[in-house]
Image (cartoon, coloured by chain):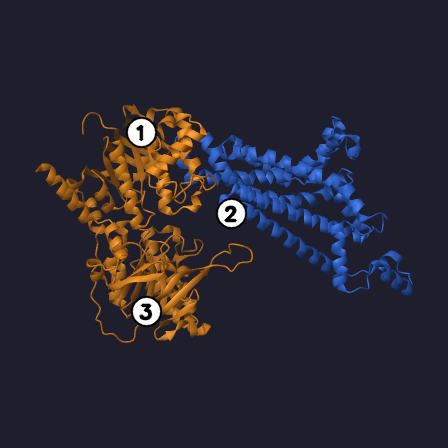
């Protein structure tokens, strides 16, 4: 670093509506530097970025100095900030699905900043927008300027957002979780693009992420935040080598956490679940009024078997059909072909009553711990929901006993049953979801992205809980996830799914160590890996020293 | 967009066809024999039969339906029992009052509510917002016939700016006609504008918190430009829905308002036809009103396509 840094945040305090959010945050970014900011939700990393942009919510009061190219941004007035935003500081947001205006073309949206700051004509701005989209990997042949956001994939949208942010070559770019909503292979491409852009324009980049592996791979320096304060900061390799703060260490261990799992004995009796040549098709809207409606095959002749007490991972990127497969296995959807045998019976040949009986033995845990509970019901009612599947009616006293037992089992207290879901944190809600699944003493739990919405430390606890439940109750899991580290940590076998088909299967360790299918190889190569990233950085450092 | 419009037109025709079947069927089920109505309760059975034969009431159901629909399409709606003039002439004459009235009311309510709704949302929880919310609450609560009387007292009797009622006919020139329509239009528009203002406000408050507005601000756009060019176009989508629904309320609202202002419109005609049991007029008016509502919803659908590109591509 030479001379004054590009951005120098000193002693930043922030309160929103009287609640302190940031406490004495220091952060500097030099030209051409990638600065990673890591922390769990609520750590204040996004608020720090929004303070730099001065786009804080109403009622926010920031104190301290945020010095950008010699100008104190906290002292700047709104017109000054309007000319700085977009021109001197660009920003990329987390959710590419909602960051673009659905009723405007992408050409209009990319050109907008150029027209606003440079007063370019419509034609000039559009031709500049065209070359910007070319630069971010969306050439004309692939994407016309007249497309609307809903016609683009998630990765394409994030490229458009990046094109907008770098339109005026800002010296500083802030990317707030730019790849969190994307699939791993797309994530790798977007990260590469950001890295290239930084090198090309000697831009400073603040990369905000919850993912230590992503940040270690990308950032020259890292700041770790917790509860609005900076707990540790420094050059990437040095930081990982000399980590002192207990929170940073916890974050590191949690993100690579492997729960203790006792290997189940492989005495193969009849399989618990057997899926044969399963096909699930969806009817798409008709193209013309009288033509036959086209169909889309979401699940394409899938077969596999699960032994009792084992857990199987189902891995694949968004849209590959893994959730549809789960729905069909749970008999929530009727397949167009093939069958599902659970405990030896064909689910689609059973009458309603027999299917109810089977359903008691297969329960589900969903991704979103916020959306899967009715907010107006108390925990007792929510957790007791599956009990209506039981053949004999459950009395009120039995119900309370069973709910209490289930809550205690997942590490909550029996007293929690009179609370409402909003009184629980995200991790506790996922425990509630597991308690709800356990109440009917199931043999199989289908877990659809059960830890994806959770912070790493919470995720580690929930994974431990899953492992513990398996050991104690002999449960089987069908574990659906896009996150390879999670699948690696919790499953015996893994199925890799692409475009509705299983392209590779095998014991988890073997598939991860020596993938055979090119798609599995691509997935594994694209997945962020902390050790690999650090090793690469060490080699680069050693090369410089030598 | 072309395919989208074609689909909507196909839907429009289909809905209209179903509507005529339903109306015809309901009229068949309803008790009351037109022949007996015309000739009175004292009429002899053979005279009744002769008239039924003459009116074609003895023909099979589907033949009568087809001849009724053909009549509708060619503008032959039959003859009113009470006025003894063709129903089509009656409706043509009256629609010249009601349609302009409803359109003026709709325009007024749109012109008032959208800026007010935007203002309230932009100044959320401040004086302007609270004032607008209080006023619109009042606007929804006040019955519009009472508000109409208030308007008459203020502008017709005290200030003498406009007539208190009646309609001079379009032959009298544009200005007198507009003068006659303005008070009823304001009275009709008030509750609609109040509702629409609130919808606009809450819809805009939602879109103002959407991520793309923040993206626009991050590009450097000022709060005002981001509001008008990003938040408002998205906020208009639900407002359009409500506007389409309100048009039918406006049409039925004219029944009261036209009676308050002595306007010779559809609303007054329908009121008179019902009290005089002039079933053929009632039947035709229902068809006209249903068609008007269906056509307006068709226009709203087209407007959706213009406002929201996602619907266009879905077709």
Which one is in front in this view, the residue at disc 2 or the one at disc 1? 2
- The residue depicted at 68 percent of the width and 46 percent of the height is B292
Q: CA distance from mark 2 to mark 1?
A: 46 Å
According to the picture, the residue beneath numbered tag 2 turns out to be B311
Q: Is residue A531 left or right of residue B180?
A: left
- The residue depicted at 72 percent of the width and 60 percent of the height is B25
- Rendered location of residue B35, percent (x, y): 85, 59
According to the picture, the residue beneath numbered tag 3 turns out to be A443
Visual hue assigned to chain A: orange
Visual hue assigned to chain B: blue
Query: Which chain letter goes with mark 1?
Result: A
Q: CA distance from mark 3 to mark 1?
A: 56 Å
Query: Which chain letter goes with mark 2?
Result: B
Which one is in front in this view, the residue at disc 3 or the one at disc 1? 3
- Rendered location of residue A5, percent (x, y): 23, 28
- Rendered location of residue A107, percent (x, y): 42, 37
Q: Earlier in the sequence, mark 3 or mark 1?
A: 1
**Image quarter of residue A216:** top left
Query: Which chain letter goes with mark 3?
Result: A
């Amino acid at each position: 670093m030479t001379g004054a840094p590009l951005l120098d945040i000193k002693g930043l305090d922030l309160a929103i509506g009287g609640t302190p959010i940031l406490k004495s945050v220091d952060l500097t970014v030099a030209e051409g530097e990638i600065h990673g900011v890591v922390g769990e939700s609520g750590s204040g990393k996004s608020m720090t970025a929004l303070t730099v942009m001065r786009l804080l919510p109403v009622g926010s009061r920031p104190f301290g100095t945020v010095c950008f190219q010699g100008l104190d941004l906290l002292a700047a007035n709104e017109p000054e900030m309007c000319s700085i935003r977009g021109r001197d500081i660009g920003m990329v947001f987390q959710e590419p699905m909602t960051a673009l205006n659905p009723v405007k073309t992408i050409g209009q949206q990319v050109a907008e900043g150029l027209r606003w700051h440079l007063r370019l004509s419509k034609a000039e701005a559009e031709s500049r927008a065209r070359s910007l989209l070319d630069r971010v990997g969306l050439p004309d042949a692939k994407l016309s300027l007249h497309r609307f956001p809903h016609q683009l994939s998630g990765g394409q949208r994030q490229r458009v957002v990046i094109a907008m942010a770098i339109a005026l070559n800002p010296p500083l770019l802030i990317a707030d979780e730019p790849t969190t909503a994307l699939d791993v292979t797309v994530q790798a491409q977007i990260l590469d693009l950001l890295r290239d852009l930084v090198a090309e324009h000697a831009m400073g980049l603040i990369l905000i992420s919850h993912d230590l592996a992503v940040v270690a791979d990308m950032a020259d320096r890292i700041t770790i935040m917790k509860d609005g304060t900076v707990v540790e900061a420094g050059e990437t390799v040095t930081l990982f080598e000399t980590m002192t703060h207990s929170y940073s260490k916890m974050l590191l261990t949690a993100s690579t956490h492997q729960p203790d799992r006792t290997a189940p004995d492989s005495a193969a009796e009849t399989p618990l679940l057997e899926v044969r040549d399963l096909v699930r098709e969806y009817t798409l809207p008709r193209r013309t009024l009288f033509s036959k409606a086209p169909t889309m095959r979401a699940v394409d002749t899938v077969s596999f078997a699960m032994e009792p007490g084992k857990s199987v991972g189902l891995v694949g990127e968004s849209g590959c059909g893994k959730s549809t497969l789960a729905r069909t296995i749970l008999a929530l959807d009727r397949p167009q072909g093939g069958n599902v045998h659970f405990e030896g019976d064909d689910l689609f040949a059973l009458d309603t009553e027999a299917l109810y009986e089977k359903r008691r033995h297969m329960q589900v845990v969903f991704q979103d711990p916020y959306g899967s509970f009715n907010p107006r019901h108390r925990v007792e009612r929510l957790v007791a929901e599956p009990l209506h599947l039981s053949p004999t009616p459950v009395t009120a006293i039995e119900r309370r006993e069973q709910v209490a037992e289930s809550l205690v089992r997942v590490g909550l207290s029996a007293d929690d049953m009179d609370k409402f879901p909003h009184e629980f944190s995200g991790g506790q809600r996922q425990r509630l979801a597991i308690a709800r699944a356990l109440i009917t003493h199931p043999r199989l739990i289908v877990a659809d992205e059960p830890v994806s919405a959770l912070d790493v430390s919470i995720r580690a606890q929930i994974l431990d809980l899953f492992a513990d439940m398996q050991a104690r109750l002999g449960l089987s899991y069908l574990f659906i996830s896009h996150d390879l580290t999670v699948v690696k940590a919790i499953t015996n076998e893994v199925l890799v799914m692409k475009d509705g088909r299983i392209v590779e299967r095998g014991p988890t360790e073997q598939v991860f160590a020596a993938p055979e299918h090119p798609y599995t190889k691509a997935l594994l190569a694209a997945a962020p890996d902390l050790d690999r990233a650090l090793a690469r950085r060490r080699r680069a450092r050693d090369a410089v020293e030598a | 967009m072309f395919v989208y419009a074609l689909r909507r037109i196909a839907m429009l025709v289909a809905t209209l066809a179903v509507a005529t079947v339903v109306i015809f069927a309901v009229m068949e089920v309803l008790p009351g024999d037109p022949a007996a109505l015309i000739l009175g309760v004292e009429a002899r059975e053979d005279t009744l039969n002769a008239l039924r034969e003459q009116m074609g009431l003895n023909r099979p159901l589907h033949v009568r339906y087809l001849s009724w629909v053909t009549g509708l399409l060619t503008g032959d709606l039959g003859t009113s029992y009470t006025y003894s003039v063709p129903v089509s002439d009656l409706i043509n004459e009256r629609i010249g009052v009601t349609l302009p009235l409803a359109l003026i009311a709709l325009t007024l309510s749109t012109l008032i509510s959208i800026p007010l709704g935007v203002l309230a949302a932009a100044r959320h929880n401040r004086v302007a917002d609270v004032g607008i919310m209080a006023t619109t609450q009042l606007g929804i609560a006040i019955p519009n016939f009472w508000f109409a009387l208030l308007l008459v007292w203020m502008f017709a009797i005290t200030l003498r700016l406009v007539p208190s009622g009646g309609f001079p006919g379009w032959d009298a020139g544009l200005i007198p006609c507009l003068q006659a329509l303005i008070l009823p239009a304001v009275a009709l528009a008030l509750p609609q504008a109040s509702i629409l203002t609130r919808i606009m406000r809450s819809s805009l408050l939602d879109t103002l918190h959407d991520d793309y507005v923040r993206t626009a601000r991050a590009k450097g756009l000022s709060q005002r430009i981001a509001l008008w060019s990003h938040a408002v176009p998205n906020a208009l989508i639900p407002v359009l829905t409500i506007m389409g629904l309100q048009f039918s309320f406006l049409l039925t609202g004219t029944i009261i308002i036209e009676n308050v202002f002595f306007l010779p419109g559809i609303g007054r005609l329908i009121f008179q036809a019902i009290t005089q049991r002039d079933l053929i007029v009632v039947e035709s008016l229902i068809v006209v009103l249903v068609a008007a509502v269906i056509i307006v919803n068709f226009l709203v659908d087209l407007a959706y396509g213009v406002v929201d590109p996602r619907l266009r591509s879905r077709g």
